[in-house]
Image (spheres, rainbow, N blue to C red):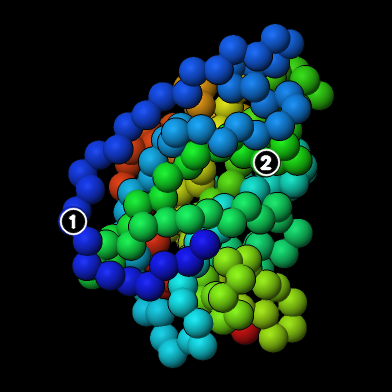
């Protein structure tokens, strides 16, 4: 679903909780399906990128890592501060409805848990439950279908949260205690539910991940999203 940019009152907070009790599933019922509910969480932020002269309105989607290998790859990209150009190829895309605010703010209600295919079992790594790692993608919806169309002649990605140094994280379980690869840079504890995964650097120490509340403002920058 897409919306033209319009002047609307500023929404300062929109908090809701998810209360589900599903036998045999995790706290958020990740085992079998997503649940359309009142917003589980609400992301807010600012767009700092020119939209340009596209043929249609703008839209948003969440791009999720399709497997644990891709999760490590995207996490390494985030940690290194690299460009996410082309990262949407092969990602699981979940179209999202958002509310624009004049002149450049937005509110993105997360009214379901991540799509089932994005809910990755942590048991192969020695963890428990499931995890989903993704990012917000803001794009020019030329054919007005609300879906990011990729490939030759595909729609233009305007900005992403991955380029801005933040990923969207959903956890229903616990990360492994013994870790290797980029997992060693993850926080020791990550809250259940939605949060944001950011990067911190302390002096001469190498960068590492930090878990931020989902209420942290997202700044969607396009400076590093330069595609050929």
Indicate whether 108 appears above or below 132: below
Residue on which disc 2 sits:
115
Q: Label 2 neighbourhood size at 10 Å, few (<14), some (14-19), many (20+)?
A: some
Q: Is residue 201 something that shows in the picture?
A: no
Q: Indicate the position of residue 138 as horizontal and vertical percent values.
A: 48, 65
Q: Position of residue 101 (x, y in %)?
A: 27, 62
Q: Nearer the viewer, residue 69 or 43?
A: 43
Residue drawn 75% across the image and 46% down it: 66
The kind of secondary structure element at disc 2 is loop
Quarter-of-image position of residue 71: top right
Residue at horizontal 67%, vertical 26%? 30
**Which residue matches tag 1?**
9
Near-viewer residue (159 or 224): 159
Residue 60: x percent and y percent? 50, 61
Which residue is found at the position 48% from the left and 42% from the top? 110
Residue 193, relative to residue 127: is it above or below?
A: below
Tag 1's secondary structure?
loop
- Side of 148 relative to 17 (left or right): right
Tell me whether circle 2 and circle 1 mark residues in contact (CB < 8 Å).
no
Q: Nearer the viewer, residue 28 or 203?
A: 28
The disc placed on residue 67 is: none
Q: Residue furthest top?
A: 23
x and y, in percent, of residue 198 in the image:
44, 42
Left-right relation of 39 to 62: left
């Amino acid at each position: 679903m897409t919306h033209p940019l319009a002047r609307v009152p500023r929404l300062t907070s929109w908090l809701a909780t998810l209360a589900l009790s599903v036998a045999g599933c995790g706290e958020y019922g990740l085992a079998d399906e997503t649940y359309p509910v009142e917003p589980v969480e609400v992301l807010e932020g600012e767009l700092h990128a020119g939209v340009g002269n596209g043929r249609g309105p703008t839209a948003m989607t969440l791009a999720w890592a399709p497997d644990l290998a891709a999760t490590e790859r995207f996490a390494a990209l985030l940690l290194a501060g690299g460009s996410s150009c082309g990262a949407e190829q092969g990602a699981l895309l979940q179209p999202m409805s958002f509310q624009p605010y004049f002149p450049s703010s937005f509110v993105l209600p997360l009214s379901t848990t991540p799509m089932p295919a994005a809910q990755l079992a942590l048991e192969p790594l020695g963890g428990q439950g499931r995890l989903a790692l993704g990012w917000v993608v803001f794009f020019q919806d030329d054919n007005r279908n609300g879906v990011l169309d990729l490939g030759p002649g595909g729609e233009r990605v305007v900005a992403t949260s991955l380029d801005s140094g933040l990923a969207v994280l959903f956890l229903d379980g616990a990360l492994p205690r013994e870790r290797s690869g980029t997992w060693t840079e993850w926080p020791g504890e990550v809250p259940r539910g939605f949060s944001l995964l950011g990067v911190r650097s302390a002096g001469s120490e190498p960068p590492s991940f930090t878990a931020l509340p989902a209420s942290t403002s997202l700044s969607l920058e396009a400076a590093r999203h330069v595609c050929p």
